[in-house]
Every structure is written in structure tokens, then in C-alpha cells.
């Protein structure tokens, strides 16, 4: 494979050249500052015997630019007086080019062979392929690799394009976290990337995913554990990605309470699968809170801590390189870069206590800094680090109109992972019309299209993933909105604009149990009283477009509706909410299901005697009778793994009726009776192993004879053996660590010199 080096910055190219020619010459080149005359075309490295290596990254530039640079550099070379001078450049030139460069360099050039052009560098890369993989940006930038990544991601990450990947690779600053991540994935098959907001968790996860994709793994980005259980296939090489799995802004306690056992079970399945890897990202403070309140995440037997990699602690050199890469890729005007260099603020930025790649990205985006005069740019940069929320505050309040603000507010309470154009339009139309009428603002039929056009590329992304999907451009925007929207009067006005139960539930979760004071929660709950008709009547499923014989998700599950109504009844004691609860319990839209409702149904028995709500529910007897029937029905139709999950929930509950135990026993005995037929269609080793664990768990509890248990296990083990005979086990991609230089001196002079080449792009 041949590389053109176009996706490498000057600094990346210098690192590559030092490693590559150092390997060829058997020397270790160390970083050395710019020449005595302050030359800015390249940087030198010095080895034993005063051998000097200089890298000139002039990819795409005409040869005359390189010759002009070498004429200017001659005085610096003569002052250094090396015993040998080596030049490496990405500038293309003909064979005669070396003859023209030789006299410009002078007597320090001992041979024209010491001038390395792109063809010479590619020859060395073929000779030393280990260096290619130690420079992940170079390797991922290879045309063949990029094509494999895009092709492998075609049906799961439709939003990925060649340009998207190249952009992300170019701003990525290689650091030890990448090597540690691969090592953890190889050892445990699981990786939890944790850290503060904006430190690069998702970027690292994406780089890892691209690496796996390039070696023909299938990428499965999941938004729920149900997605993961449905997709896992032990016969395929699969890399699962669950971004912000515990919530994007705050811990999703409700989801954790009902799914932490599923998370533990899915992790166990991944660990048992020969061909699966699982990457999760989460904010550090959310992860620590989850571990404190979750029995399963805190379980020492699972010991999730050994899968956790904390990111965000960067060396000074890496922080400088992140800033450098963003300035380079975003093509920040040179007047701004010059102002940074002349102000002597670079060190203050890199060493700032609030240094964060997300702030760096924002402050190198010309959209957000275009209103800043170059002379004021350094001070504005420092101010943004002092108060990161100010970046979005100015843009949100002054750069966009009310149509755009209304669209972003509507998006905030929709899916965290992107929302379809159709769903977003519906939410926007209702909110925009109501807010515009209330405050006397103009609104018209084309407002949605206009707002989306204005916001695209600066506030939101639009991608085609099974139809146009809109998502926030940067997670920090949602952080900002989480503060801006925490206004009781505003939220009360938003309640009647809800077009879905999911949207309304997201708004309620935003303020309850800790977003607002109890008094403000009461006000918002009372404002929701007029929404009960939608909650009672809106279907959970709907016919799939173009295929009326199948169904697709439409709105919240019945248990989620009941939980929200219970909250409102608790804080207001309003009879309308109690009446709605009993109406749904009597006639739930399309019934209850084990996956979405089973654990919640068990929890509802805690209402008995008002233990959770301070007083008995006014329809307690009838409600519990209806829930009991719903629960026994869902148990009867549950699979073995779902039964195992529900049994854990039962063990954690008190006061359950005997009918629940009888339903479990009947379902378990049927699992044993139907064991042969149920395993014949299962091709997953990990799923079958989980079945063994479940049967071992069930047998003594429900009186299954030891001989029957052993017979069932033997059948399953034979089935696993059949699958193993025809499957191969995959290993994670292997990469050699880059030649790290973090132990080398990186003082203010080195910091300044790093950025000088940006002025001569």
C-alpha cells in the first residue's frame, strides 16, 4: 500500500519520519527545537555524532515551495554544522529534484540518498510494516483501510463516510489510552471508557471501532441492551458499541434499576463469546453513582473495575497536539494562530485546569469564533476555558433565532441517539406553534425546514440512517440545554406541547426526582393532568410503514406510563392520575410484555401499604389483582434468560402472591420439558452457556430432579460442541505501541515551536 500522508499534520509527519528513519539508521532521534534563526519550515532532531534529521511536510505543494524553503533554511543548517544532514519530505518531485536540492542544502548533505521523498518513505514503510501500525493515524488513513472500514460499516453506521472518518482521524491525537484499550479488549473482551465530559471518550471508542472494522469485524452500535441481545451471533466477529450507556447528562436511574441485571448478563455473554467485543462509554461521575446504587454493577463477582479505562489525563505534549490538530484541520485563520503565538497564551491554554478537547474543538471552529477579533482571540480562548458553558450560551442566545431555539428545545426531550425527521417535525410543530403564539413571535409553514437548514453543521448533524436522522452536533450542547431548560415556568409551558408519551416522560425524568424542588415538581405534575388521555390511548406498537403485517415501536411501554402516573399521583394526590392508572391496568394498550414491563410489574407490589408512596394507593386491591394477572401471564411466556432476570427481581421484592411462584414453577418445568426443541435453533455458544446457568439456578429452587438437570445440561453441551466444531475464534487487532516521547522535555519553547509551521501552511 502507498501512502500520500495528506491526513497527517506536520507534527504527525515529523513523528513518523523520526521513527521510520531512526529504524533504518539504527538511531534514536530526539525532538530538537527550530533552527537558531527561528526557521519555521520544519523541526530538527539530533542523534549521536551530531546527525540532524529534518522533516518537511509539503504534501500537495509545488516543488518550488520546497526549494524556496531550503534556501531559507541553509543558514540554520550551516549554524548547526551537523556531521550529516538528512531531509525527509512529503513533497513529490522528479529524480532530478534531488540534484537540485543537494546544492541548496550544502556540504552537510553527504549523499543524495539522504534526501527521502514520498516514494522513499513508502519503501521504508513496506520494509518496516510495524511502524505503520504504530502510527494509527497513518494506518487508518490508508485508502485500502478506509474503504474496508466504510464497507464494513455500511449497514450499521450508515452515517459513516470516507470524509467523516478522515476528519476524525486527522484531529485525533495518539496517546497511550489506545494501546491500553486494545489490551483490555483482548484480555477481557469488554472495555468501559470512563471520564469527565468532553475528554474524548467517544473519539477513542470510534478509533477503536474503526480499527476493528478495518479487519472485517461487524460493528453493532446499540442504543439498548435489547439491541445487543437481538444482534449477538457467536459465528460472526462483532464489535458492540454502547455510547453513554448510563445516560448522557445524568444517571438514568429508572433504566438502571430495570436493566442493570441485563447489563451484567450481556457482559457475561460477551465474555463467553469467542468472537465478540463490547465497548461502553460513560461519564465518570455517572459511573461512580451507578456503582453505588446498582447491586449488579457493584457485584465483586462481576468486578467491572477491571474493564474500566479512565481517559482525560493527558500529558502536556498530548494536550498541545490536540490543540494543534484542531487548528490544523479546522483551518483556523492564520491571523488567529499568530495572535495565539504572539500573546504567549499557548502555555496558559494547554496548562489550564479546565483543559478539555471539547472546548478546544469549539474554540477552533470558525462558526463560533468568527465574531471575535483576532487580537481578542487568546483572551476569548482563556475565557471559554474559565467558563465552558459560555461557548454555547452566546451562540444559542444571539446567533440563532427563536425557530432554531425551539427546534433544539424539542430535540432535547427526544432520543439521545438521534431522531427521525418525521418525529422531530411533529415535536417541533407543536412546541413552536404554542411558544410563538404565547410570546407573540412570527411563525409559518416553512419554519422547520429553515431552522434545520440554519442549524445543520453548527448545532446538529443530519445523516441518512434508514431515513434522515438528526442529532446534536456536540454533546456539550445538551449539557448547556440541561441548565438552560431547568426553568419551572418554561417547562410548564412545554408540557401541553408534548406529542408523545416518551417526550413527556423525558421531561418528567429531567425534573424528578432531583432536577427541581418538590414544590416545582408538584407544579409540573399538575400541568400534566390534561395529558392523561394521550397516555391512556396512544398505542405502544403500530403497523410498520410498507408492511402492515409487522409492527414497529410507536410510544412508551405500559409500565413506563403507569410509573409516571404513579409519580404524579404521589406528588399531587390528584384523583385524575389514580383513575388513569386503574384504567390502563384494566385495559393496557396492546398488553404487557416480559421485556419491557416484567420487572416493573414486580416493583408495583411495593405499593402495598404505601411503603414507597407514604400512603396506600386508593385502588390498591384491584390494581394489585390486575398486576398479578399481568405478571403471571408474562412469566408464562418468558424465555429462560428472561425468567432468570425476573427471578432476580422477585428475590429483591417482598409480599408477592403465591401465584407468581406457581407461574415460575410452571414456566421452569416447561423449559426442561422443551429443552431439546428450544436449543436446536440456537447457534450462540454464549446464549447456550447462559441457558445452562439458568437451568442450574432453577432446578433446586423448583424441585427439578438432579438427573433431569444433568440430562438437559449434557444436551446443551453437545449442542455447543457442534457449534464449536464449525466456528473459529477471533482475536482483537494487534498494534505495536508508538515510539512514545512523553518523557522528553516539552517546555514552553517546544510548545511554541510546535505551532510555528501552522503559519506557513
Image (cartoon, rainbow, N blue to C red):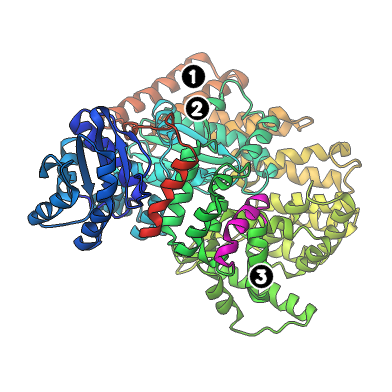
What element does badge 2 sit on?
helix
Disc assigned to residue 382: none
Pinpoint residue 484: horizontal percent, then vertical percent. Answer: 73, 60
Query: In this view of the protein, can residue 459 be seen by the observer?
Result: no
State which tag comes first along the sequence, 1 or 2.
2
Q: Is residue 468 above or below residue 271?
A: below
Identified at 43% across, 30% down, the residue is 180
Span shown in magenta: 372-389
Q: CA distance from mark 1 to mark 2?
A: 8 Å
Contact between labelled residues 2 and 1, with CB atoms less than 8 Å apart: yes
Question: Where, quadrant-wise, is the C terminus in this rendering?
Answer: bottom left
Pinpoint residue 270: horizontal percent, then vertical percent. Answer: 45, 33
Query: In this view of the protein, can residue 565 be seen by the observer?
Result: yes
Q: CA distance from mark 3 to mark 2?
A: 57 Å
Identified at 53% across, 67% down, the residue is 367
What element does badge 3 sit on?
helix
Q: Which residue is mark 3?
A: 405
Q: Is residue 273 above or below residue 343?
A: above
Identified at 51% across, 65% down, the residue is 366
Q: Is residue 33 magenta?
A: no
Disc assigned to residue 709: 1
Pinpoint residue 679: horizontal percent, then vertical percent. Answer: 41, 33
Secondary structure mostly taken by the magenta-highlighted segment of the chain: helix
Q: Which residue is mark 2?
A: 672
Give the crowd class for mark 3: few <14, some 14-19, many >=20 residues within 10 Å.
some
State which tag comes first along the sequence, 1 or 3.
3
Amino acid at each position: 500500500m502507498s501512502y500520500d500522508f495528506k491526513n497527517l499534520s506536520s507534527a504527525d509527519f515529523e513523528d513518523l519520519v523520526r521513527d521510520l528513519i531512526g529504524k533504518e539508521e539504527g538511531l534514536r532521534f530526539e525532538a530538537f527545537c527550530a533552527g537558531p534563526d527561528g526557521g519555521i519550515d520544519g523541526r530538527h532532531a539530533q542523534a549521536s555524532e551530531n546527525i540532524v534529521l529534518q522533516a518537511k511536510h509539503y504534501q500537495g505543494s509545488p516543488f518550488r515551495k520546497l526549494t524556496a524553503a531550503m534556501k531559507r533554511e541553509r543558514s540554520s543548517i550551516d549554524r548547526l554544522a551537523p556531521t550529516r544532514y538528512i531531509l525527509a519530505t512529503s513533497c513529490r518531485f522528479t529524480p532530478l529534484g534531488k540534484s537540485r536540492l543537494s546544492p541548496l542544502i550544502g556540504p552537510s548533505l553527504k549523499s543524495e540518498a539522504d534526501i527521502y521523498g514520498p516514494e522513499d518513505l513508502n519503501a521504508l514503510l513496506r520494509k518496516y510494516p510495524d511502524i505503520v501500525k504504530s502510527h494509527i493515524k497513518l494506518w487508518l488513513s490508508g485508502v485500502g483501510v478506509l474503504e474496508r472500514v466504510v464497507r464494513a460499516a455500511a449497514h450499521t453506521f450508515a452515517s459513516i463516510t470516507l470524509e467523516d472518518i478522515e476528519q476524525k482521524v486527522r484531529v485525533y491525537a495518539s496517546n497511550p489510552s489506545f494501546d491500553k484499550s486494545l489490551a483490555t479488549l483482548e484480555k477481557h473482551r469488554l472495555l468501559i471508557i470512563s471520564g469527565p465530559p468532553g475528554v474524548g471518550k467517544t473519539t477513542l471508542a470510534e478509533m477503536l471501532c474503526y480499527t476493528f472494522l478495518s479487519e472485517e469485524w461487524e460493528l453493532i452500535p446499540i442504543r439498548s441492551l435489547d439491541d445487543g441481545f437481538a444482534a449477538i451471533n457467536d459465528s460472526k466477529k462483532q464489535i458492540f458499541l454502547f455510547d453513554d450507556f448510563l445516560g448522557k447528562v445524568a444517571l438514568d436511574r429508572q433504566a438502571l434499576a430495570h436493566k442493570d441485571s441485563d447489563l451484567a448478563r450481556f457482559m457475561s455473554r460477551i465474555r463467553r463469546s469467542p468472537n465478540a467485543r463490547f465497548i461502553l462509554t460513560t461519564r465518570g461521575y455517572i459511573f461512580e453513582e451507578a456503582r453505588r446504587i446498582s447491586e449488579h454493577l457493584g457485584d465483586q463477582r462481576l468486578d467491572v473495575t477491571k474493564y474500566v479505562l479512565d481517559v482525560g489525563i493527558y500529558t502536556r505534549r498530548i494536550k498541545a497536539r490536540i490543540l494543534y490538530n484542531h487548528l490544523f484541520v479546522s483551518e483556523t485563520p492564520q491571523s488567529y494562530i499568530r495572535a495565539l503565538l504572539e500573546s504567549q497564551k499557548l502555555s496558559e491554554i494547554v496548562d489550564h485546569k479546565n483543559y478539555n478537547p471539547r472546548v478546544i474543538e469549539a474554540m477552533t471552529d470558525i462558526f463560533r469564533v468568527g465574531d471575535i477579533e483576532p487580537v481578542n482571540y487568546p483572551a476569548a480562548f482563556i475565557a471559554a476555558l474559565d467558563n465552558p458553558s459560555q461557548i454555547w450560551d452566546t451562540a444559542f442566545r444571539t446567533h440563532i433565532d427563536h425557530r432554531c431555539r425551539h427546534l433544539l428545545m424539542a430535540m432535547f426531550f427526544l432520543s439521545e441517539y438521534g431522531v427521525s425527521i418525521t418525529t422531530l417535525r411533529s415535536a417541533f410543530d407543536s412546541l413552536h406553534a404554542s411558544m410563538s403564539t404565547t410570546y407573540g413571535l412570527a411563525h409559518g409553514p416553512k419554519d422547520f425546514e429553515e431552522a434545520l437548514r440554519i442549524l445543520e453543521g453548527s448545532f446538529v448533524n443530519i445523516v441518512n440512517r434508514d431515513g434522515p436522522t438528526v442529532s446534536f452536533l456536540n454533546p456539550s450542547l445538551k449539557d448547556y440545554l440541561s441548565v438552560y431548560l431547568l426553568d419551572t415556568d418554561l417547562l410548564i409551558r412545554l408540557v401541553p406541547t408534548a406529542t408523545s408519551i416518551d417526550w413527556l416522560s423525558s421531561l418528567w425524568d429531567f425534573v424528578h426526582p432531583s432536577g427541581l424542588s418538590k414544590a416545582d415538581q408538584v407544579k409540573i405534575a399538575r400541568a400534566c393532568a390534561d395529558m392523561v388521555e394521550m397516555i391512556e390511548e396512544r398505542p405502544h406498537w403500530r403497523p410498520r410503514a410498507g408492511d402492515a403485517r409487522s409492527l414497529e415501536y410507536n410510544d412508551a411501554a405500559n409500565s413506563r406510563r403507569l410509573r409516571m402516573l404513579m409519580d404524579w399521583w404521589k406528588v399531587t394526590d390528584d384523583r385524575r392520575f389514580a383513575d388513569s392508572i386503574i384504567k390502563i391496568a384494566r385495559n393496557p394498550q396492546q398488553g404487557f410484555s416480559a421485556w419491557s414491563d416484567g420487572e416493573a410489574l414486580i416493583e408495583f407490589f411495593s405499593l402495598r401499604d404505601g411503603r414507597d408512596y407514604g400512603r396506600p394507593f386508593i385502588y390498591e386491591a384491584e390494581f394489585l389483582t390486575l398486576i398479578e394477572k399481568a405478571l403471571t401471564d408474562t412469566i408464562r411466556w418468558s424465555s429462560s434468560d428472561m425468567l432468570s432476570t425476573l427471578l432476580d427481581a422477585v428475590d429483591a421484592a417482598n409480599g408477592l402472591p403465591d401465584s407468581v411462584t406457581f407461574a415460575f414453577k410452571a414456566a421452569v418445568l416447561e423449559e426442561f420439558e422443551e429443552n431439546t426443541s428450544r436449543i436446536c435453533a440456537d447457534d450462540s455458544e454464549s446464549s447456550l452457556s447462559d441457558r445452562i446457568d439458568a437451568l442450574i439456578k432453577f432446578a433446586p429452587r423448583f424441585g427439578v430432579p438432579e438427573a433431569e438437570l444433568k440430562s438437559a445440561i449434557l444436551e446443551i453441551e453437545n449442542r455447543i460442541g457442534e457449534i464449536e466444531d464449525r466456528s473459529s475464534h477471533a482475536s482483537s487487532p494487534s498494534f505495536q505501541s508508538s515510539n512514545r516521547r512523553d518523557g522528553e522535555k516539552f517546555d514552553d519553547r517546544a510548545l511554541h515551536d510546535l505551532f510555528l509551521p501552522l503559519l506557513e501552511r
